[in-house]
Image (spheres, rainbow, N blue to C red):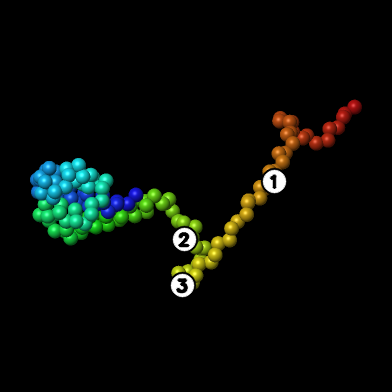
Amino acid sequence: MAVLMREAIGGSLRRARTARRRTLREVSRRARVSLGYLSEVERGRKEPSSELLAAICEALDIALHELLSEAAEAMAADAIAAADAARLRHPVGLRHMDLRLAGAGDDGPALPLTPIGPAAHPVAPQPASPQPVGLASVGPVCAAA
């Protein structure tokens, strides 16, 4: 699932706050926002208004456009990672649309593949009738009298 904008903004706010070694309480006082709401914003559970976001950025001494740029980069990185993961989920081998008949050159279009019906089951050969083992044919027998 893609990262939502509020989650990316919240993560960027938290990184900015912790990099400046500020507590939630300090930032919430300077921005004039409740501590609980600021915590929810940082966790990506609440989407702040542009006015509130500007007040939080001012309390952190960062420019709003810098915060939004960092959030956009985080979202882009997540989208690339998701695309890479999706590409890895595909089965190894060729897809049916990538198949070409042998002999179809690169300069000409590939020949269409025609579906093959169910394979006919060949008739199994009948086993030969068993012959007694150890008896050899001797030929005509003459009786001597």
The answer to whether residue 117 shows anywhere in this view is yes
Does label 1 or label 3 sit earlier along the sequence? Answer: 3
Q: Position of residue 4 (x, y in %)?
A: 29, 52
Residue under pointer 2: 98
The residue tagged 1 is 123
Res. 67 image quadrant: bottom left
* Left-right relation of 50 to 26: right
Cα distance in 3D space between marks 3 and 2: 16 Å
| The quarter of the displayed image where residue 53 is located | bottom left
Residue for point 45% across, 69% down = 106
Residue 100 left/right relative to 35: right
Structural crowding at the residue carrying mark 1, measured as other residues with C-alpha within 10 Å and reported as few (<14), some (14–19) or many (≥20): few
Kindly identify the residue that appears in the image at 27 percent across and 57 percent down: 76
In the rendered image, which residue does mark 3 sit on? 107
Sooner in the amino-acid sequence: mark 3 or mark 2: 2
Under mark 1, the amino acid is Val
Above or below 132: residue 3 = below
Q: Position of residue 145 (x, y in %)?
A: 90, 27
Q: Which-is-in-front pick, marks 1 and 2?
A: 2
Q: Secondary structure at mark 3?
A: loop
For residue 126, above or below residue 53: above
For discs 1 and 3, the disc positioned in front in the rendered view: 3
